[in-house]
């Protein structure tokens, strides 16, 4: 349960080596009242390094998780993640950018991007949200993308996957009203991380710590959707309605 001051005592990070996810986790830990942290991901060695980098303080446990696993594996994962008690905050921060040109030619590559970013995310969210509803409280933060608003030709497979996830989460957030469970979607723009290294930064490019701060502010105020940086909300409000011939002329 969250403590008397509203600080989460337990946090699960799905995508336990994600730079954005870890930055957000560190921002949550700044309250000084979190007692238990679960880092979940595919690379056990990298998870151990991330756990060590968190320093002393809360108990940190690592769990194996792969978005591409079967639904039954996701069910088992949630059972393991909730073995030691309730989850106050869940951060879903895994994702796969993929190669757009390859996904246009290779159906397996296209499916991998869709499966990781959309299908796999939903498959683990279903049992997670069921568990949170059973405990009667909790907040899930799902890191979507500004690409979900209007996919560009440079990364439309990734954008389509994030659009599917974003839409599913918006609908689920409405279904959760009155249950004690909340789902918040975060839509970052271009973020300087290892995943985007070597790419040309888009306008309003930002850093993981800035996304983490925007996410924390959203958690505190009870937001349903967070933009990082906030100015992207108004930028995309205009770009969403830009005529297609003009949209196609924008830099890829």
Image (cartoon, rainbow, N blue to C red):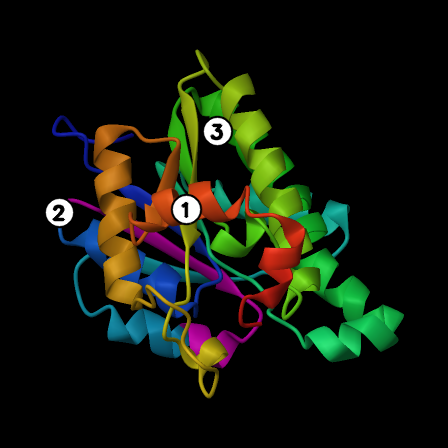
How far from the left and from the top, in percent, is residue 41?
A: 53, 65
The answer to whether the residue labelled 1 contacts the one labelled 3, judged by CB atoms less than 8 Å apart, is no
Report crowding for label 3: few under 14, some 14 to 19, many 20 or more residues within 10 A (C-alpha): many
Residue 132's disc number: 3
- Residue 6 sits in which quadrant? top left
Q: Is residue 159 left or right of residue 115?
A: left
Is there any visible trace of residue 73 in the rendered image? yes
Residue 31's disc number: 2
Query: Is 137 part of what is drawn in magenta?
Result: no
Q: Nearer the viewer, mark 1 or mark 2?
A: 1
Is there any visible trace of residue 59 in the rendered image? no
**Residue at x-position 86% and y-position 76%:** 105
The residue where tag 1 is placed is 186
The answer to whether the residue labelled 2 contacts the one labelled 3, judged by CB atoms less than 8 Å apart, is no
Q: What separation in Å lies between label 2 and label 3 (alpha carbons)? A: 22 Å
How far from the left and from the top, in percent, is residue 39?
A: 42, 60
Question: Where 6 falls versus 53 (above or below)?
Answer: above
Disc count in the image?
3
Q: Quadrant of the C terminus?
A: bottom right
């Amino acid at each position: 349960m969250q403590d008397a001051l509203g600080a989460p005592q337990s946090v699960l990070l799905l995508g336990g080596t994600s730079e954005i996810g870890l930055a957000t986790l560190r921002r949550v830990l700044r309250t000084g009242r979190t007692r238990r942290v679960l880092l979940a991901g595919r690379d056990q060695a990298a998870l151990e390094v991330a756990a060590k980098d968190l320093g002393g303080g809360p108990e940190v446990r690592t769990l194996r998780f792969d978005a591409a696993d079967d639904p039954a594996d996701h069910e088992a994962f949630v059972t393991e993640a909730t073995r030691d008690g309730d989850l106050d905050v869940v951060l879903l921060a895994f994702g796969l950018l993929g190669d757009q040109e390859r996904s246009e030619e290779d159906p397996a590559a296209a499916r991998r991007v869709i499966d990781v970013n959309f299908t796999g995310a939903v498959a683990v969210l279903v049992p997670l949200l069921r568990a949170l509803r059973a405990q009667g409280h909790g907040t899930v933060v799902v890191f979507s993308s500004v690409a979900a608003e209007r996919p560009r030709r440079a990364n439309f497979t990734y954008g389509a996957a994030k659009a599917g996830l974003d839409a599913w989460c918006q609908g689920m957030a409405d279904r959760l009203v009155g249950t004690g469970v909340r789902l918040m979607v975060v839509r970052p723009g271009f973020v300087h991380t290892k995943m985007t290294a070597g790419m040309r930064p888009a306008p309003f490019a930002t850093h993981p710590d800035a996304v983490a701060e925007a996410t924390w502010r959203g958690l505190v105020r009870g937001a349903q959707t967070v933009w990082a940086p906030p100015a992207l909300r108004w930028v995309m409000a205009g770009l969403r309605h830009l005529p297609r011939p003009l949209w196609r002329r924008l830099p890829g």
